[in-house]
Amino acid sequence: MNHSLFDPTGSEPQPPPIVAGTAAEFGHPLLELRWYGELARLVADPVMGGRGVPRGDGRSVLLLPGLLAGDSSLSLLALFLRRIGYRPIRCGIRLNSGCFATFDRRMVGKLVRAHDRSGRRVAIIGHSRGGHYARSLAARHPNLVSHVVTMGTGLEDPMDVSALCHWAAATVRTALHTGDPQRAAFGCLTAGCTCAPSRAFNMAVPEQVRMTSIFSRTDGVVRWSSCVADYADCVEVPGSHLGMAFSRHAYRAVAHALAQPSS
């Protein structure tokens, strides 16, 4: 697939602002404090009631949370999807450690059961690190996946994130590697991880899977330019990285993405 970059306001994308190297590497963590306001605005917005967006077709949608988050972080998204006519499926992750292999069997099982129950391919929505899982699943199981929608996810380099996020990942990585030689040998939670799900992340997105990347230029965690690729429909929304899980703008983009026919 080869889709041009666009944003929901109809404006042309502008070049990224020039930021001093240390600031760009450090990121903008204070911008993430906006998520409280984004949550409040979502609850009051008509979109949360399912108004003004395309209706769903009853398709199952697997939801994958971000790093150090769990199913509960996507509870409002699940409620929204149910209201507009989809069947959201929680993957059973209480705390996402960021390790592909830890949750892979569980996610594949959910995907297979949802497909077998409905006889239809399943859509996957992944927030942040969950988007990396979504891409890996689609690459290995295109016969089971119709759409992948990522929110604040680097599509090529999973570690193209701010310094603070690198430090958080390093802390989790140390915990995962300690006492687990296999994870250490794989290089778990690094860009060069060699486990099978991580290798699949680097495979091309299958043409039969519709790929949408929702991103924000004011993302305080992930470098926004890493969320842009010519094989995805790239949709820009305002807001923070954390707040994308309950952003009224992101929810509208999700509804429109799922309404598009799979390729």
Image (cartoon, rainbow, N blue to C red):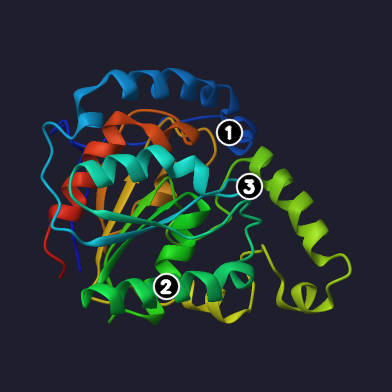
Residue 50 locus on image (x, y percent): 18, 35
Q: Position of residue 218 (x, y in %)?
A: 43, 30
Is residue 144 visible in the rendered image? The answer is no
For marks 1 and 3, the one nearer the N-term is: 1
The mark total stands at 3
Label 3 or label 2, whichever comes before in sequence order: 3
Q: For the view shown, which residue lies furthest in the front direction?
A: 117
Residue at mark 3 to residue at mark 2: CA–CA distance: 20 Å
- SS at mark 2 in the image: helix
- Which residue is located at x 33 percent, y 36 percent? 15
Numbered label attached to residue 135: none
Q: Secondary structure at mark 1?
A: loop
How far apart marks 1 and 3 lie (CA) works out to 19 Å
216 left or right, relative to 232:
right
Q: Please name the residue shown 35% across and 45% down the image.
A: 78
**Disc 1 marks which amino acid?**
Gly
Residue bearing mark 3 = 68
Residue at horizontal 61 percent and vertical 30 percent from the top: 23
